Image (spheres, coloured by chain):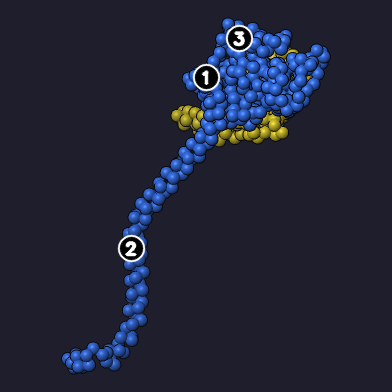
């Protein structure tokens, strides 16, 4: 052994044959041992890091969750912003209007005239017979109010009469729903004088009164026909607002002149205030009504 | 045993009520299972199916609840459907218990009769007597298709209620 040591010292670290031979034999074992050791070490380290990784994973998941929430909020705010943007023009033109934004939460399966339920009620200041609009135009009126919901009847409904005028000719009449036209998403403007200059494409607006403010867009004339009795004309109206697809609407809870001519609650008295006998002059004054009893 | 029965009976009725409210939500959601713009009255077949499988008290409660949900989601006078379905469901429950065997044929019969009576009365009171022009269009294009669609759902709901009843009742009888 001493001889080996002296030999090694003498050759200044250069491996001698014996050393090389032993090294060569031991190398594969060392290699395998190293591999096993490395594997075990990795495995142990991996096992030890699992907790750490799990925590990181949870943190990342939480971050993703938060980012998703932010995205939802962002989309929601973006949609709201777009919606309010549309109504800004109406608000600027009619500073006396007070709006209550609402969402359509239900549609009546029985209704033939597209009546629907919105998510705002008396707690939010919505009242019976408040006008309901979209950014495109008039859509209907509140028929029934609950604490947190309201039912809206639409302009397709024959029980809703709206005093209106044609913006170009200033001819007045009453916009009312009709069974056959409602199926096609249209309504009609009745009591137009026989000498009316109304033409296809003319715009129809509300004439104002106790239920509807003046100047709300209703629709355009698609066709002009003669009434069966032949005394007056009526126009088939294509509403601007898409009643059956409306999702977000605005309720006009207050405007100048609202309810001034109302002397009694039609819903309570059961009185039918149909404008069927009203002439065009009456329409100009105030011809909007909701027939009671339905 | 009694406690087990109470638990499983509670679970059964909880399921019924849950389904009823889901059906109501489906009924008032635009475009849901809509065929050519026609939507069925989902809660009526379910109330009829419960009436056919359960006792008179349950039939009365589910008839009333279904009717009031119909009233809530429609323009009809509140209580109109409630009263109608209450009476109808009690009658169906009694007939199923004493006279008529419960199967898909009787489901069509009961469902058809109740839905038809309701649709006709509603059409009469809420459209016909108001004298709108072209009133027949509403009946032909809307009321009849909706009626047919609603009646066609009857066996489906009978099967569903029978399955729930069978599962829940067998659990406490074990």
- Decide which of A120, A18 is in the foreground and name it: A120
- The alpha-carbon separation of the residues under discs 3 and 1 comes to 25 Å
Is residue A148 shown left or right of residue A35? right
- Mark 3 and mark 1 residues within 8 Å of each other at the beta carbon: no
Q: Position of residue A272 (x, y in %)?
A: 66, 9
Residue A141 picture quarter: top right
Up-down relation of residue B83 to residue A51 (above or below): above
- Decide which of A215, A139 is in the foreground and name it: A215
Is residue B92 shown left or right of residue A256? right
Look at mark 3 in the image and give the residue it sits on. A266
Disc 3 is placed on an element classified as helix
Q: Residues within 10 Å of mark 3 (few under 14, many from 20)?
A: some
Look at mark 2 in the image and give the residue it sits on. A45
- What residue is drawn where x is 51% and y is 34%? A80
Rendered colour, chain A:
blue
Q: Position of residue A199 (x, y in %)?
A: 76, 24
Q: Earlier in the sequence, mark 3 or mark 2?
A: 2
- The alpha-carbon separation of the residues under discs 2 and 1 comes to 72 Å
Q: Which mark is residue A96?
A: 1
- The alpha-carbon separation of the residues under discs 3 and 2 comes to 81 Å
Q: Is residue B86 visible?
A: no
The chain under label 2 reads A
- What residue is drawn where x is 74% and y is 15%? A191
Q: Which mark is residue B62?
A: none
Q: Position of residue B88 (x, y in %)?
A: 65, 19
- Decide which of B55, B160 is in the foreground and name it: B160
Q: Earlier in the sequence, mark 2 or mark 1?
A: 2
Q: Earlier in the sequence, mark 3 or mark 1?
A: 1
Q: Position of residue A49 (x, y in %)?
A: 34, 58
- What residue is drawn where x is 43% and y is 47%? A64
Q: Nearer the viewer, mark 3 or mark 2?
A: 3
């Amino acid at each position: 052994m001493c001889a080996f040591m002296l030999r090694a010292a003498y050759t200044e670290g250069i491996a001698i044959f014996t050393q090389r031979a032993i090294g060569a034999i031991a190398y594969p074992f060392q290699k395998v041992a190293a591999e096993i050791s490395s594997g075990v070490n990795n495995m142990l380290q991996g096992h030890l890091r699992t907790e750490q990784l799990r925590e990181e994973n949870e943190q990342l998941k939480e971050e993703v969750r938060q980012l998703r929430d932010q995205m939802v909020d962002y989309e929601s705010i973006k949609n709201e912003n777009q919606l309010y943007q549309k109504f800004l023009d109406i608000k600027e033109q009619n500073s006396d209007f007070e709006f209550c934004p609402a969402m359509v939460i239900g549609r009546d399966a029985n209704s033939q005239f597209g009546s629907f339920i919105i998510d705002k009620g008396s707690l939010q200041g919505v009242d019976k017979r408040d006008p309901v609009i979209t950014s495109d135009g008039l859509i209907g009126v509140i028929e029934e109010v609950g604490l947190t919901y309201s039912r809206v009847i639409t302009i397709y409904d024959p029980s809703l009469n709206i005093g209106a005028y044609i913006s170009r000719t200033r001819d007045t009449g009453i916009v009312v729903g009709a069974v056959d036209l409602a199926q096609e998403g249209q309504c009609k403007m009745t009591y137009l004088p026989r000498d009316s200059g109304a033409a296809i494409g003319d715009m129809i607006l509300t004439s104002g009164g106790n239920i509807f403010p003046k100047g709300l867009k209703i629709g355009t004339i698609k066709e002009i026909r003669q009434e069966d009795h032949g005394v007056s004309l009526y126009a088939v109206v294509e509403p601007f607002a898409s009643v059956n697809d409306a999702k977000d609407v605005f309720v006009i809870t207050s405007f100048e002149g609202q309810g001034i001519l109302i002397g009694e609650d039609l819903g309570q008295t059961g009185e039918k205030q149909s404008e069927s006998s009203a002439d065009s002059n009456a329409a100009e004054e105030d011809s909007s009504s909701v027939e009671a009893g339905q | 045993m009694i406690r087990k029965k109470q638990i499983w009976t509670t679970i059964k009725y909880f399921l019924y009520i849950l389904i009823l409210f889901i059906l109501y939500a489906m009924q008032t959601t635009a475009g849901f299972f809509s065929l050519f713009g026609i939507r069925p009255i989902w809660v009526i077949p379910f109330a009829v199916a419960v009436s056919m499988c359960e006792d008179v008290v349950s039939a009365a409660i589910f008839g009333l609840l279904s009717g009031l949900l119909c009233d809530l989601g429609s323009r009809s006078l509140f209580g109109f459907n409630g009263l109608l379905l209450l009476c109808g469901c009690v009658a169906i429950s009694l007939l199923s218990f004493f006279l008529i065997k419960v199967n898909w044929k009787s489901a069509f019969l009961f469902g058809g009769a109740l839905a038809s009576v309701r649709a006709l009365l509603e059409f009469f009171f809420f459209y016909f007597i108001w004298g709108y022009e072209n009133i027949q269009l509403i009946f032909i294009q809307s009321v009849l298709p909706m009626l047919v669609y609603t009646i066609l759902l009857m066996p489906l709901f009978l099967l569903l209620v029978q399955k729930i009843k069978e599962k829940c009742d067998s659990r406490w009888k074990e």
